[in-house]
Image (tube, coloured by chain):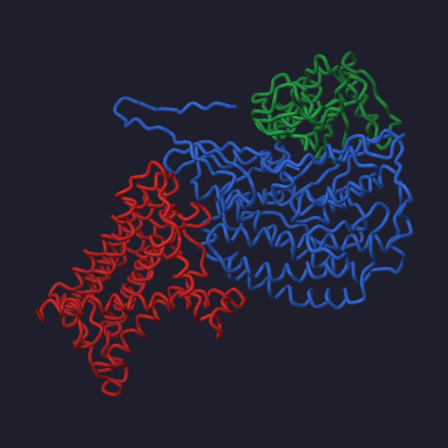
């Protein structure tokens, strides 16, 4: 009995976190966008700078009609948003929120995460194909090509960290970085870990389909890409999945390179409860960075995207991994 | 309706492929209006583009023949290129004045120059902003529109309208400049160069933007001339031709300004980046013209030469001016005994510039087509009239 | 070069194709030629090095209300900076004009518009179909003609309000 109760609590906590975080980050994204664009953004709903606007948006989306296009594949069409969300939600199981809480303490933690986020690709392809719309199909195919290509630099940079840490278990990776700012992985084997982090950051931008790699949802070319035909709650699921994905990759980069739930001051302000605070803030910082990039840069074309992945990031990450491996052996 | 055959290539041993016909339909976020582009694509590579226009046809030329006098045609002319309306009015009014042989006072000519150049800056700001938006850069769009608002403010205090003015009349203007126009103009002249530098830093010299636009949609100079292109499209291909210098009208021959041409700085001469950069530099030149015009502005009465009834003699005239989008020409036939025009033909720059689109977009990808279309800078109101 | 000199050049080669040269027209002089010789004359104007008319500024259709349609060509030379006006008149019953699309490609869309609005058939145009009006606008109904009657119904919708 307690076993099932444990499992339930362990799975509901990340879900609650995702929901609350999504509402907050929606507001943050629009506000950052507005201030970058020299305007004010949300101001009215709920009083101070429109803090209740995302909640109002959510309520509106809940009440919208579910339109299914004619001649579409109904089963795939309905399942697609859930597959996309499930792919990124399931990966939250292996994230250590703090030293005492991790939903599933897997020995193959990071490997499991890389594998399970591939579900997202299947979901996107289902969405694009079942919409019976040439533009959605284009968006879905581009997205599949992009995500699959960028998984290689991502996996290689994660592999570099695994070489340094010697384990795939994310909780242990965090434990090894305990002790303050200079014990974090990004300062080891300089400058290779820094390069690894940069490669991982750029590749993860492509994994979550954010600008400058947001070809699949390129608004000005394909209307909305693979989720053109979705309305109401299904559309909200896609959005939720995108934001969940954003935090997922930011959280992973925080764990692998920046100490996870470790406090930068060492013993000061550390402890299980503070661990959550530090982990979430580091994750949110990288999410904020992703948002800033979206509103600054134009987007890359599909073949330039492929060029960056295969001809720039992959060779650099190969060289990187060999350098770090050699250094670790010779130490 | 034109028919197309789906071409199939089956060579021995090769996979048989079909080309797909994709419709970038009348409603699309980046076709700048209701334009339908029929794309024949092979995967992502474009084999052919067939533009279908006429969705915004409002029978402007037929209306012009029904008007009771020439003055009444001016609001219709406004609505052709609704983004840069001062240029349209200017071209039409200058054509009628040439036909009638009217001499307008100097003050009117200087004010017309100031308005036309301000309109050029506003129109180029819109072109640049929406071009960035097409390529995914959301922020420069809003910065450009912030500057454009200042110009539209100035227009509003002068003639009451932000977008469609009915300001330039045959023989003069409808209103003189208000008293606070000078202050607003001086503020604008001071703050605009800084804003332009910010936009340049963010968009023009951004590596991703250059990758998207350099070597795309290359238009050779002789093709451009044969297709009748004009304006930044022609100058982007390296042809130094500007109607304000080659066939000066109003008082443009009294000002010192440069004519920027495309030099292939980031790629080939005549690619999208060149056309875009020509527009950016034209804005700087327009600033110079406005400063000089404002200093030399003479006093006078703007209503002095407006005729009671515009009754041109029998004859015809073709007059062209340099609109932000190219060469706008009006061919007016008057039959001498009625006061309404016999035939008014508007030669719109976007109409002619759009016809070169199939030529320059073969062999590129669909994402490039968006970039090429944005660099042609069309306004459907002009294309369809 | 002045318009009269250009006229002399054309006259020396195409004496039989000329209908009239009006030197005192307001605002600029024009030359009227026969509709079935216009393409040769335009090729000559474009290829002759001293004339070098490489830019077609405007091609307009006109309906002269006395039963004749016309096409007016305004051409310009980028190299020398001179301009010229050519005219062609055809009867309404048989409005066929040679197409100059092979000389200046910009004439392609201009001639399609003249066909669409006036019904002038351009002989030799590669793709003569309607450009501004919808593709199923009734044949024989050309909007900019002076005697144009608005059709009563279009696709089942009543047009005059």
The residue lying toward the viewer, choosing from A86 and A186, is: A86
The residue lying toward the viewer, choosing from C84 and A137, is: A137
**In the picture, which chain is blue?**
B
Q: Is residue A232 above or below residue C56?
A: below
Tally the marks. 0
x and y percent of residue C67 in the render?
A: 78, 17
Residue A236 falls in image quadrant: bottom left
Residue C119 falls in image quadrant: top right
The residue lying toward the viewer, choosing from C65 and C106, is: C65
**In the picture, which chain is red?**
A
Q: Is residue A328 above or below residue A298?
A: below
**In the picture, which chain is green?**
C
Q: Is residue B102 left or right of residue A171?
A: right
x and y percent of residue B92 in the render?
A: 77, 41
Q: Residue at x 16, y 60 (%)?
A: A111
x and y percent of residue B379 in the render?
A: 61, 43
Residue B67 falls in image quadrant: top right
Which quarter of the rendering shows the C terminus of chain C? Answer: top right
Mark yes or no: residue C82 visible: no
Which quarter of the rendering shows the N terminus of chain C? Answer: top right
Q: Is residue A161 above or below residue B53?
A: below
Q: Is residue C37 left or right of residue B372?
A: right
């Amino acid at each position: 009995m307690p076993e099932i109760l444990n499992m339930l609590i362990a799975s509901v906590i990340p879900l609650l976190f995702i929901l609350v975080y999504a509402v907050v980050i929606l507001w943050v994204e629009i506000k950052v966008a507005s201030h970058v664009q020299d305007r004010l953004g949300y101001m009215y709903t709920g009083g101070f700078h429109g803090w209740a606007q995302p909640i109002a948006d959510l309520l509106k989306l809940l009440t919208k009609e579910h339109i299914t296009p004619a001649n579409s594949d109904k089963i795939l069409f309905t399942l697609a948003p859930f597959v996309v969300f499930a792919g990124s939600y399931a990966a939250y199981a292996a994230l250590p929120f703090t030293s005492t809480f991790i939903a599933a303490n897997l020995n193959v933690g990071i490997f499991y995460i890389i594998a399970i986020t591939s579900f997202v690709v299947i979901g996107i392809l289902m969405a694009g194909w079942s919409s019976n719309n040439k533009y959605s199909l284009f968006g879905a195919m581009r997205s599949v090509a992009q995500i699959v290509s960028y998984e290689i630099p991502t996996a290689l940079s994660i592999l570099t960290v695994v070489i340094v840490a010697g384990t795939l278990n994310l909780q242990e990776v965090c434990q090894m970085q305990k002790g303050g700012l200079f014990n974090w992985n990004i300062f080891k084997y300089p400058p290779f870990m820094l390069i690894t982090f940069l490669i991982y950051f750029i590749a993860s931008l492509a994994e979550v389909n954010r600008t400058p790699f947001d070809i699949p949802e390129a608004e000005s070319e394909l209307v909305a890409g693979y989720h053109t035909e979705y309305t109401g709650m299904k559309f909200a699921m896609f959005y939720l999945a995108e934001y969940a994905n954003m935090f997922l990759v930011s959280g992973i980069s925080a764990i692998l390179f920046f100490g996870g739930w470790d406090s930068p001051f060492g013993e000061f302000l550390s402890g299980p409860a503070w661990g959550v605070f530090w982990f979430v803030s580091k994750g949110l910082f990288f999410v904020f960075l992703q948002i800033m990039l979206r509103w600054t840069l134009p987007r890359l074309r599909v073949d330039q995207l492929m060029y960056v992945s295969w001809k720039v990031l992959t060779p650099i990450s190969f060289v990187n991994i060999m350098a770090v491996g050699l250094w670790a052996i010779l130490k | 309706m034109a028919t197309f055959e789906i071409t199939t290539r089956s060579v021995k041993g090769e996979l048989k492929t079909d080309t797909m016909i994709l419709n970038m339909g009348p409603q699309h976020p980046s076709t700048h209006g209701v334009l339908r582009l029929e794309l024949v694509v092979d995967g992502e590579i474009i084999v052919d583009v067939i533009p279908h226009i006429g969705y915004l046809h409002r029978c402007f030329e037929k209306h012009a023949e029904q008007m009771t006098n020439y003055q009444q045609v001016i609001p219709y002319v406004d609505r052709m290129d609704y983004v840069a309306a001062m240029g349209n009015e200017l071209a039409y009014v200058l054509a009628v004045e040439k036909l009638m042989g009217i001499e307008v006072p100097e003050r009117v000519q200087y004010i017309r120059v100031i308005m036309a150049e301000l309109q050029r800056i506003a129109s180029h700001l819109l072109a640049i902003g929406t071009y960035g938006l097409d390529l995914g850069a959301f922020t420069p769009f809003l910065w450009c529109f912030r500057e454009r608002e200042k110009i539209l403010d100035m227009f509003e205090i002068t003639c009451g309208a932000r977008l469609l003015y009915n300001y330039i009349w045959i023989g003069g203007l409808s209103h003189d400049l208000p008293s606070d126009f000078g202050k607003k103009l001086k503020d604008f002249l001071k703050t605009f160069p800084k804003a332009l530098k910010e936009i340049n830093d963010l968009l023009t010299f951004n590596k991703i933007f250059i990758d998207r636009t350099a070597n795309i949609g290359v238009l050779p100079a002789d093709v451009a001339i044969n297709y009748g292109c004009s304006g930044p499209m022609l100058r982007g291909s390296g042809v130094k031709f500007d109607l304000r210098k080659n066939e000066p009208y109003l008082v443009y021959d009294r000002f010192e300004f440069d004519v920027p041409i495309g030099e292939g700085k980031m790629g080939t001469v005549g690619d999208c980046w060149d056309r875009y950069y020509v527009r950016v530099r034209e804005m700087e030149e327009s600033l110079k013209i406005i400063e000089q015009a404002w200093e030399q502005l003479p006093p006078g009465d703007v209503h002095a030469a407006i005729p009671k009834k515009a009754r041109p003699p029998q004859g015809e005239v073709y007059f062209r001016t340099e609109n932000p989008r190219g060469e706008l020409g009006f061919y007016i036939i008057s039959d001498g005994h009625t006061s309404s025009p016999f035939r008014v033909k508007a030669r719109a720059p976007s109409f002619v510039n759009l016809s070169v689109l199939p030529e320059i977009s073969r062999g590129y990808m669909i994402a490039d087509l968006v970039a090429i279309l944005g660099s042609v800078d069309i306004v459907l109101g002009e294309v369809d009239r | 070069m002045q318009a009269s000199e250009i006229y002399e050049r054309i006259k020396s080669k195409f004496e039989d194709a000329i209908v009239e040269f009006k030197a005192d027209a307001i605002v600029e002089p024009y030359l009227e030629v026969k509709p079935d010789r216009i393409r040769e004359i335009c090729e000559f104007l474009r290829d002759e090095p001293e004339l070098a008319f490489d830019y077609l500024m405007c091609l307009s259709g006109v309906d002269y209300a006395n039963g004749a349609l016309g096409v007016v060509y305004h051409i310009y030379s980028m190299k020398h900076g001179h301009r010229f006006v050519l005219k062609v008149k055809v009867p309404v019953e048989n409005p066929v004009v040679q197409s100059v699309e092979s000389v200046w490609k910009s004439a392609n869309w201009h001639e399609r518009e003249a066909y669409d609005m006036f019904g002038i058939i351009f002989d030799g145009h590669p793709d003569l179909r309607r450009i501004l009006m919808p593709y199923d606008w009734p044949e024989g109904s050309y909007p900019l003609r002076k005697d144009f009657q608005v059709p009563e119904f279009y696709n089942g919708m009543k047009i005059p309000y």
